[in-house]
Image (cartoon, rainbow, N blue to C red):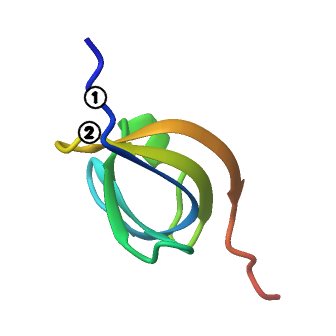
Amino acid sequence: NPPNIQNTINDVFSVEKIEKNSVSLRGQRENEIVRLSLPPDALTLIQLNDCLDLILGDTSEKWVVLEAGQVYPKVKKP
């Protein structure tokens, strides 16, 4: 059975930290840090300071991705 969702967050998150099997995200509206475990192939697509439009669910044990929208990469200055 899928875990029960306690709470959801719909926000645009900036990538604060990338680790071996997880990413730390900071929401623009909530401004809280969320640590999210992701498969290695998904982590290779994410870079520091990217912005991810996500809907996350809190299962009381971990955060899960319920829906993913756009990815806004950091604009590099010339």
Of all residues, the one furthest to the bottom in this rendering is 78
Identify which residue is drawn at 36% across, 35% down.
39
Above or below for 46 versus 5: below
- Is residue 31 toward the left or the right of residue 35 in the image? right
Question: Residue 16 location in percent, x, y?
Answer: 42, 73
Q: Are marks 1 and 2 in contact (CB under 8 Å)?
A: yes
Q: Which amino acid type is marked by label 2?
A: Thr
Q: CA distance from mark 1 to mark 2?
A: 6 Å
Question: Residue 38 location in percent, x, y?
Answer: 36, 41
Identify which residue is drawn at 33% across, 35% down.
5
Above or below for 12 versus 36: below
Q: Secondary structure at mark 1?
A: loop
Q: Quadrant of residue 4?
A: top left
- Please name the residue that numbered disc 1 is placed on: 4
Name the quadrant of the C terminus. Answer: bottom right
Query: Residue 76's mark?
Result: none
Question: Residue 10 location in percent, x, y?
Answer: 56, 54
Name the quadrant of the N terminus. Answer: top left
- Is residue 13 toward the left or the right of residue 74 in the image? left
Query: Residue 59's mark?
Result: 2
